[in-house]
């Protein structure tokens, strides 16, 4: 089926009519016409109601195009109608005869006085007009089409003056649109002509930037100079600013443009970002940085291979000296040459390098590798008149420091600030008479005022995790002590959070990792929350030169093995009932809380969790009238008996001092020597007990509070360690185990971990390893970790 389309010209407009279409005998369906002929329904293919409707045509109805739209109809719609096999068109040639010539557009682009100018013209045959201007009755023009083109120009140009479209080069949003999209669009609809000045503008955008970075080390500072032979610092700064704002172009001082997306700019901007430096910090391309940035700066420059990097000999020597694989050999004190092991000599050389360059650092050797001896070697090598060094350590080990100093460096005049306030004040008043002062974190807090006028040579923090909370009084106190050099010792620079590492470095080299808010935003949240591997890698690269970490398995070939075994025990029936009731109570509380309420109730919830742990240990810790037994206590006493009968000396650690009392009472019948250390044990008594235990040549047991005796003591005469109750932090347990598994141990050390089945203790074991991974991010760069616990996580642990 087909239809006749008749086109009639009417004084410049056009009328279109569908003729000879038998609408009276047809029924229009959705997709076809149907007719009834001689008692039979006939389906007609070809011309369909839908097709006619799409064309805007309706049988028997006239369609009219005004003068304004007739040209568009004739050029866009009519050719499509003529291609149809179902339409017979008459009058098309008559319509074309009245059409004006087709519009041809011309755009002339120029660049003057930091403005891009565009003159727009339209041609009809031999006649040329300004676009969308000077219409008269006598001229036949496509006003609608011209208006569309003008609207397109207004998308890219912001002003119109003297018959020219204008765009200032400081309007970067429109400038990018014009250069990246606009010119190509103009070429699609017309001819684009450019002046020589505009051509120069386009050519300048493709100019390659060459930038050099030179670094010189002078007087503990590095002088950084960023420059270019072909470009001023102002232009480099403009490029960096544009890159930061994600602009595609930047304006040179001569008014020309350059593309921002160049490898040189990208690498320079990325290097400055990673170094936490803003281009606004530079003055004419020059900037001074602390020398501790040198190693990381050099790494960034090696990555930015499109930059021309140069450095002076002093800088190069510093980078070489900080390479742990090529440590410079320093002169060892003669008397210690045959005492120090090879890895300890390496530690001595590393510490010397830091002190010589006035850097801080963390000696993070695993417990039992002799960090104290390495530091004493350093202090002896730097002994000089009127130069006092300060060691700040846990109260439990200050006398151990004194003993080690007297043993290996008796020529160091040493004093322990462990007496009364009056005695400590007297020592501090005569500080210059001593080579080494040893104090505890608690005493330092109390005596802080007396330290105000003192300046030490080297300040050392032992067990530096004591300042992991940067908001604590202890952390703030050690950071106000004045010293030429600062060092930290800890086998666990990270126990739970990355902020602990920031706090230690804030003591060692303030601002090395920026403010805590900067550190949290740049590293802590991305690494912990988002598992950002790039942030992790960057942090590792920054701190690696200033952390020395060795493990016993890597450096002590003669150290006996350490065997660990988890001993799972079942609760007694009454014990199990109490545990279930307490668990159900806590789950009910948590289920009713929102996240905000959970945070507010943090301490209360922690107390409830502690109750669960105490039930696992022995319900007698909570309930005086409890008449049942403890599955774990029974199994532990049996384990102790067996090991004592086999001739072993045993260390047993627990979080709960009351639990130690219960165990002690159970062991009295065994008639084996029993020693106990808690936080209430006096320092002198503590040292005496350690000496007595180590001197015994028969089986014995030492009951130790994890908080009081987990660090800083040597108990290598024991070869069995029992952890009665697991703690969230695996590092704390490992430190405790290392009281026995360290240099001087001659036997394989057997470590037992007592864990109650179907309890929170099993979940603690799992969490221990997750938290251990957090430290490995920095110390071994071996994977991500999540170190936070929210309400949902806690509910999973309990269920």
Image (cartoon, grey):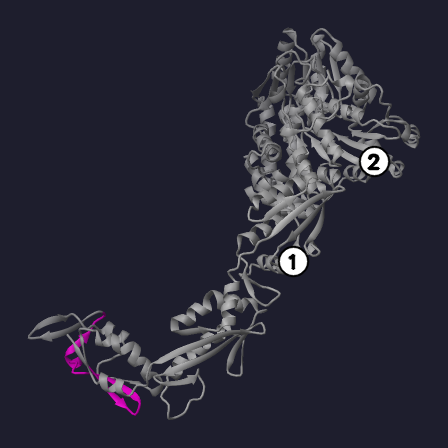
Q: Quadrant of the C terminus?
A: top right
Residue 331's x, y, as percent? 75, 24
Label 2 sits on a secondary structure element that is helix
Q: Nearer the viewer, residue 683 or 374?
A: 374
Q: Nearer the viewer, residue 563 or 413?
A: 413
Quick check: 297 left or right of 139?
Answer: right
Residue 320's x, y, as percent? 65, 34
21 falls in the magenta region? yes
Can you tell which quarter of the image residue 791 is in? top right
Q: Quadrant of the N terminus?
A: bottom left
Q: Is residue 713 visible?
A: yes
Q: Which residue corresponds to mark 2?
A: 445
Quick check: 788 left or right of 709?
Answer: left
Most extreme residue toward the left is: 38
Where 665 falls versus 730 (above or below)? above
The number of numbered badges drawn on the structure is 2
Quick check: 528 left or right of 332?
Answer: left
Residue 698's x, y, as percent? 71, 6
Q: Could you tell me if the residues under marks 2 and 1 are in contact, i.e. CB atoms within 8 Å?
A: no
Closer to viewer: mark 2 or mark 1: 1
The magenta segment: 5-30
Q: Is residue 532 visible?
A: no
Residue placed at 69% from the left, 46% from the top?
514
Where 506 falls versus 282 (above or below)? above
- Dot placed on the residue nearer the N-terminal end, 2 or 1: 1
User: Residue 233: which numbered mark, if any?
Assistant: 1
Q: Mark 1 packing: few (<14 Cα in 10 Å), some, or many (20+)?
A: some
Residue 775's x, y, as percent? 62, 33
Residue placed at 66% from the left, 22% from the top?
343
Q: Mark 2 packing: few (<14 Cα in 10 Å), some, or many (20+)?
A: some
């Amino acid at each position: 089926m087909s239809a006749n389309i008749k086109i009639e010209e009417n004084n410049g407009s056009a009328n279109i009519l569908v003729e000879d279409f038998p609408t009276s005998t047809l029924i229009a369906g959705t997709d076809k016409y149907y007719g009834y002929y001689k008692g039979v329904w006939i389906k007609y293919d070809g011309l369909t109601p839908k097709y006619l409707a799409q064309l805007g045509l309706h049988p028997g109805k006239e369609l009219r195009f005004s003068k304004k739209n007739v040209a568009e109809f004739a050029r866009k719609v009519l050719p499509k109608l003529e291609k149809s096999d179902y339409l017979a068109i008459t009058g098309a040639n008559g319509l074309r005869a009245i059409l004006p010539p087709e519009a041809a557009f011309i755009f002339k682009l120029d660049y003057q006085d930091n403005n891009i100018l565009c003159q727009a013209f339209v041609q009809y045959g031999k006649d040329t007009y300004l676009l969308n201007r000077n219409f008269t009755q006598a001229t036949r023009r496509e006003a609608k089409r011209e208006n569309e083109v003008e609207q397109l120009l207004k998308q890219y140009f912001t002003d119109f003056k003297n018959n020219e479209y204008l765009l200032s080069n400081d309007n970067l949003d429109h400038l990018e649109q014009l250069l990246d999209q606009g010119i190509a669009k103009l070429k699609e609809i017309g001819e684009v002509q450019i002046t020589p000045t505009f051509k120069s503008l386009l050519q300048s955008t493709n100019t390659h930037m060459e930038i050099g970075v030179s670094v010189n080390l002078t007087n503990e500072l590095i002088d950084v100079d960023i420059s270019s032979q072909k470009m001023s610092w102002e232009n480099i700064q403009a490029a960096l600013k544009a890159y930061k704002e994600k602009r595609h172009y930047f304006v040179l001082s001569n008014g020309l443009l350059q593309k921002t997306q160049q490898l040189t700019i990208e690498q320079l901007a990325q290097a400055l970002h990673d170094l936490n430096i803003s281009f606004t910090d530079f003055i004419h391309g020059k900037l001074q940085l602390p020398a501790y940035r040198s190693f990381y700066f050099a790494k960034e420059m090696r990555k930015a291979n499109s930059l021309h990097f140069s450095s002076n000999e002093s800088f190069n020597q510093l980078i070489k000296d900080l390479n742990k694989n090529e440590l410079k050999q320093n002169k060892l004190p003669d008397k210690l040459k045959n005492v120090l092991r090879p890895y300890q000599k390496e530690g001595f050389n590393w510490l010397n390098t830091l002190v010589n360059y006035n850097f801080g650092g963390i000696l993070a050797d695993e417990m039992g590798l002799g960090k104290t001896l390495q530091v004493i070697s350093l202090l002896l090598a730097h002994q000089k008149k009127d130069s006092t060094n300060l060691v700040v350590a846990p109260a439990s080990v200050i006398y151990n420091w004194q003993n080690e100093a007297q043993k290996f460096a008796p020529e160091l005049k040493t004093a322990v600030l462990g007496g009364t306030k009056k005695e400590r004040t007297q020592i501090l008043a005569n500080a210059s008479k001593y080579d080494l002062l040893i104090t505890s974190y608690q005493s330092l807090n109390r005596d802080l005022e007396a330290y105000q006028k003192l300046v030490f040579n080297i300040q050392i923090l032992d067990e530096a995790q004591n300042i992991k909370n940067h908001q604590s009084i202890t952390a703030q106190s050690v950071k106000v002590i004045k010293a030429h050099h600062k060092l930290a010792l800890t086998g666990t620079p990270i126990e739970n959070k990355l902020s602990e590492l920031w706090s230690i470095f804030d003591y060692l080299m303030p601002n090395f990792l920026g403010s805590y808010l900067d550190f949290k935003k740049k590293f802590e949240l991305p690494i912990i929350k988002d598992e950002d591997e790039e942030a992790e890698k960057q942090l590792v690269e920054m701190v690696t030169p200033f952390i020395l970490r060795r493990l016993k398995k890597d450096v002590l070939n003669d150290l006996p093995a350490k065997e660990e075994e988890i001993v799972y025990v079942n609760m007694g029936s009454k014990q199990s009932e109490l545990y279930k009731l307490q668990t159900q109570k806590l789950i009910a509380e948590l289920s009713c809380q929102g996240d905000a309420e959970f945070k507010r109730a943090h301490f209360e919830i922690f107390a409830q969790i502690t109750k669960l742990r105490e039930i696992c240990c022995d319900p007698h810790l909570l309930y005086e009238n409890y008449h049942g037994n403890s599955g774990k206590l029974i199994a532990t006493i049996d384990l102790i008996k067996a090991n004592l009968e086999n001739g072993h000396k045993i260390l047993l650690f627990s979080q709960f001092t009351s639990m130690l009392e219960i165990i002690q009472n159970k062991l009295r019948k065994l008639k084996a020597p029993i020693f106990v250390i808690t936080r209430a044990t006096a320092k002198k008594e503590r040292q005496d007990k350690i000496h007595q235990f180590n001197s015994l040549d028969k089986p014995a047991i030492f009951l130790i509070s994890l908080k009081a005796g987990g660090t800083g003591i040597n108990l290598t005469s024991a070869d069995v360690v029992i952890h009665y109750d697991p703690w969230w932090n695996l590092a704390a347990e490992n430190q405790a185990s290392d009281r026995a598994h360290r240099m001087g141990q001659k036997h394989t050390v057997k470590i037992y971990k007592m864990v109650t089945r179907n309890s929170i203790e099993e979940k603690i074991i799992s969490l221990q390893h997750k938290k251990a991974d957090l430290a490995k991010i920095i110390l071994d760069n071996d994977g991500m970790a999540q170190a936070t616990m929210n309400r949902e996580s806690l509910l999973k642990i309990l269920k």
